[in-house]
Amino acid sequence: MKNLKKWLMVLMASFMLVGVVEGCSSAGTETEDTETEDNQTDDGTETEGTEDDSQPDENGQ
């Protein structure tokens, strides 16, 4: 049982290490296209502001 726990800990540590290495690598993540789905409308034009701008705040204003 101790041997199984030891191997599970090694396996989980290796998955964490792979995740950190993948998360920290920045090769090939740069994009030149600044238009994203968030600032596009259905017809393909850019919007000004965000969707939250049109909703009233807590005071109803």
Image (cartoon, rainbow, N blue to C red):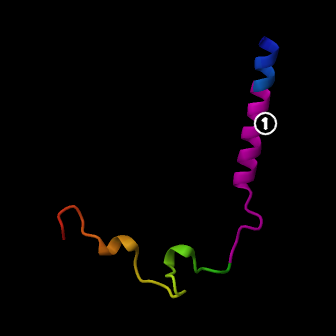
* Magenta highlight on residue 23: yes
- Side of 6 relative to 44 (left or right): right
Label 1 Cα neighbours within 10 Å, binned few <14 / some 14-19 / many ≥20: few
Q: Quadrant of the C terminus?
A: bottom left
Q: Position of residue 58 (x, y in %)?
A: 22, 61
Task: Tell me which segment is drawn in magenta.
Answer: 9-31
* Above or below, 27 relative to 31: above
Residue at 41% across, 83% down = 48
Q: Quadrant of the N terminus?
A: top right
Q: Nearer the viewer, residue 18 or 53?
A: 53
Q: Quadrant of residue 37?
A: bottom right
Residue at 77% across, 44% down = 18
* Magenta highlight on residue 20: yes
Secondary element at image label 1: helix
Q: Quadrant of residue 52?
A: bottom left
What is the total number of numbered labels drawn onto the structure image?
1
Amino acid at the residue labelled 1: Ser
Q: Position of residue 17 (x, y in %)?
A: 75, 41
* Above or below, 31 relative to 57: below
* Above or below, 15 relative to 56: above
- Side of 4 relative to 59 (left or right): right
Residue at 33% across, 74% down = 53
- Name the main secondary structure of what is drawn in magenta: helix
Q: Position of residue 25 (x, y in %)?
A: 74, 57
Q: Position of residue 28 (x, y in %)?
A: 76, 68
Q: Nearer the viewer, residue 41 or 21?
A: 41
Please give the residue where the numbered disc 1 appears in the rendered image.
14
* Above or below, 26 relative to 46: above
